[in-house]
Image (tube, helix red, strand yellow):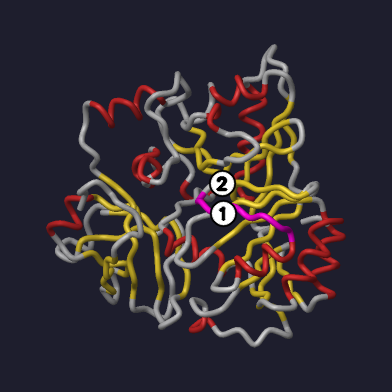
Amino acid sequence: MNEYWQTFLQQQGAALEQGIVTEFASSKFEVKDIDRTTLLVDLSHRGLLKASGADAQAFLQGQFCNDVLAVDSQQSQLSAYCTPKGRILASFRLLQADDGYLLSMEHDVVEATLKRLRMFVLRSQVIFADASNDYVQIGIAGPEACPLLEAAIGSIPDTNNAVSRKANLICIRIPGRSPRFEIYGPMAEIEPLWTTLSAASCPVASHHWTWLDIQAGLPSITAPVVEAFVPQMINLHWIDGLSFKKGCYPGQEIVARTHYLGKLKRRTYLAHIDSPTCPAVGDEVHRLSDPQGQSAGKILLSHPAPEGGCDVLVVMQIEAVESDEIIANRDVQTQLQFKALPYSVDGAA
């Protein structure tokens, strides 16, 4: 986290651990009110990579699973970077900024992703850099997000993944149960925006953004699940994060074969667990009929639920969900209660 931004947040009453906001001392926010409250969130748990140079677009088009050519000043996209075997190394939001592109991803995969991308630059005129300290990322979500943001920066995007800009601020609308936006920009412009928005919203810990992602069915690859899934397993093809019409990229043959010739055997589900302890990302879940047997799935995202217990995104064997009850804890046999995702999954289980 930018040290000046960290100091600013602490002056606003933020408590931080390893650069992540864990709470705001002055906030009266309660988790049970998360759906009814307009939340203001620091997103420093996410890092940023920047790609610039004359060949940046062409290079990225040959590396990522979505169509980079569709990204412009008014449109962002979800995408992923895969191994030649189609396994995801990082998932991210791709957007245009300044003279290049920004990739917003989980902070714990930034360094490895940066190192790997640089390995393949060769003679291409493209430069990769960690831009996590050059930009500040914040989010606002809730019933008053639209009027508050519109009053602060003017025009705001009205469709998911669309982008609006004011000076050096980049505003992106992202999926959510209520209006939700991410804003990127230099600290000099984000700081007064935060001050304005916080006067009529509720600053909260960064991890609450994860619960909003879970409810929106938006996956995110963190270090514990690197190389665990192919793009379809985390539903990227259902949330405009995967193109089957673009050219080649690492893993494209595997991804295309699954789409055109195979049958999807795993996908991501939204579920609730009645347990005081949330499972960790990467934890395995099992069939109730065979708790000591092979894994039937793996936790992708996890967060305490407003009503108690825990909400998760979990990558599951479709056949297991159709034929058996699933447990998240083999000792106490805590069952997963599956819920509908907020987008169509084309008739899948």
Which quarter of the picture shows residue 190?
Answer: bottom right
Instruction: Measure the C-alpha gap from mark 2 to mark 1.
Output: 6 Å
Residue at 15%, 61% (x, y): give it: 324
Spot occupied by residue 96 in the image (x, y as percentages of width and height): 66, 37
Which quarter of the picture shows residue 242?
Answer: top left
Task: Judge from the rendering whether residue 16 lies leftward or rightward of residue 337; answer left or right.
Answer: right
Q: Amino acid at mark 1?
A: Arg
Spot occupied by residue 30 in the image (x, y as percentages of width and height): 56, 85
In reply to whether residue 156 is colored magenta, the answer given is yes
Q: Quadrant of the N terminus?
A: bottom right
Query: Mark 2 touching mark 1, by CB under 8 A?
Result: yes
Observer-nearest residue: 265 or 147? 147
Residue at 18%, 54% (x, y): give it: 320
Q: Amino acid at mark 2?
A: Ala
Farthest residue, direction bottom: 28
In reply to whether residue 111 is colored magenta, the answer given is no
- 134 up-or-down from 291: above or below: above
The residue under label 2 is 162
Residue at 34%, 73% (x, y): give it: 273
Observer-nearest residue: 253 or 260? 260
Farthest residue, direction left: 323
Observer-nearest residue: 6 or 334? 6
- Highlighted magenta segment, given as a residue range: 153-160
Spot occupied by residue 64 in the image (x, y as percentages of width and height): 51, 30
Residue at 45%, 19% (x, y): give it: 248
Element marked by disc 1: strand
Q: Residues within 10 Å of mark 2 (few under 14, many from 20)?
A: many
The residue under label 1 is 173
Task: Judge from the rendering whether residue 220 lies leftward or rightward of residue 148; answer left or right.
Answer: left
Please name the predominant secondary structure of the magenta segment in the image: loop
Observer-nearest residue: 341 or 148? 148
Q: Residues within 10 Å of mark 1 (few under 14, many from 20)?
A: many
